Image (cartoon, rainbow, N blue to C red):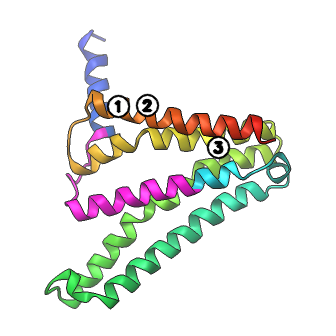
Amino acid sequence: MTDAEPRIRRTRLYRRLVTRADGPLEPARAASRLSAYVYGNILILAAVAASTPGSIEHGTAAVLVLATAGTTFVAHVFADFVASSQIPEAHGDATDEQRKFKAVEELRDAVPILSSGTFPALMLALGWLSVIPAQWSELLAGGVVVVRIATIQMATERIRGNPLTFRAVLGGLATATVAALIVLAKVFLGH
């Protein structure tokens, strides 16, 4: 392996992380997807922070996180459906077929709400199954969300088709630091 090969692999990995295969999203869809990403992570962080060692050990914390993700997703999709059916002119002169396609896009753009709860629920389930101590499972669940919050700027640049900048990375680290301090304070001071 030459010296250039690891750099090429890193470059490919970097491109996969910060570039969408289908190219950038149009601004309205990018905003919708980013809104779902932020909203989902905030609500999941709140659900994780609300967990207690007892709720983790009984499995209700993992269920609460999954239920939060699922019901928030359904509520978000329902709200989009109601809004678009009440104000159809917002989609211009779209045909019924185009409106159906738009509904599928809106559904797809809400998926980050669901994905925000998957790994935190898994971490909490590890505490429930006694694979790791409850306090550690809560820290790990919160840590997963903090990392997702740290990547908000990366996600923004990715869906807009922009290259990742050092400023965006610093912004993500600052945001994640604040979120991490909140989670740490809750776990160590709240129990």
In this rendered view, identify the residue nearer to me: 153 or 119.
Answer: 153
Disc 1 marks which amino acid?
Answer: Val
* Disc sitting over residue 169 in the figure: 1
In this rendered view, identify the residue nearer to me: 59 or 85.
Answer: 85
- Label 3, label 1: how far apart the Cα atoms are: 22 Å
**Image position, residue 126 (x, y; %):** 74, 44
Disc 3 marks which amino acid?
Answer: Ala
Q: Residue at x 31, y 17 (%)?
A: 6
**Image position, residue 175 (x, y; %):** 45, 37
Q: Would residue 131 be visible to someone looking at this image?
A: no
* Disc sitting over residue 141 in the figure: 3
Q: Residue at x 15, y 83 (%)?
A: 92
Q: Quadrant of the N terminus?
A: top left
Judge left or right: residue 44 versus residue 18: right
Judge left or right: residue 182 versus residue 18: right
Q: Would residue 31 be visible to someone looking at this image?
A: yes
| Crowd band around label 2 with a 10 angstrom C-alpha radius: few (<14), some (14–19), many (20+) | some
Judge left or right: residue 177 versus residue 123: left
Q: Secondary structure at mark 1?
A: helix
**Image position, residue 20 (x, y; %):** 26, 48
Q: Is 44 colored magenta in this rendering?
A: no
Q: Secondary structure at mark 2?
A: helix
Judge left or right: residue 31 versus residue 94: right
| Secondary structure mainly formed by the magenta segment | helix
Q: Which corner quadrant of the image does residue 127 belong to?
A: top right
Answer above or below: position of 186 versus 110.
above
Answer above or below: position of 8 versus 34.
above
Question: Magenta stretch?
Answer: 18-43
Reading the image, the residue beneath label 2 is 173
Between marks 2 and 3 in the image, the one whose residue lies nearer the viewer: 2
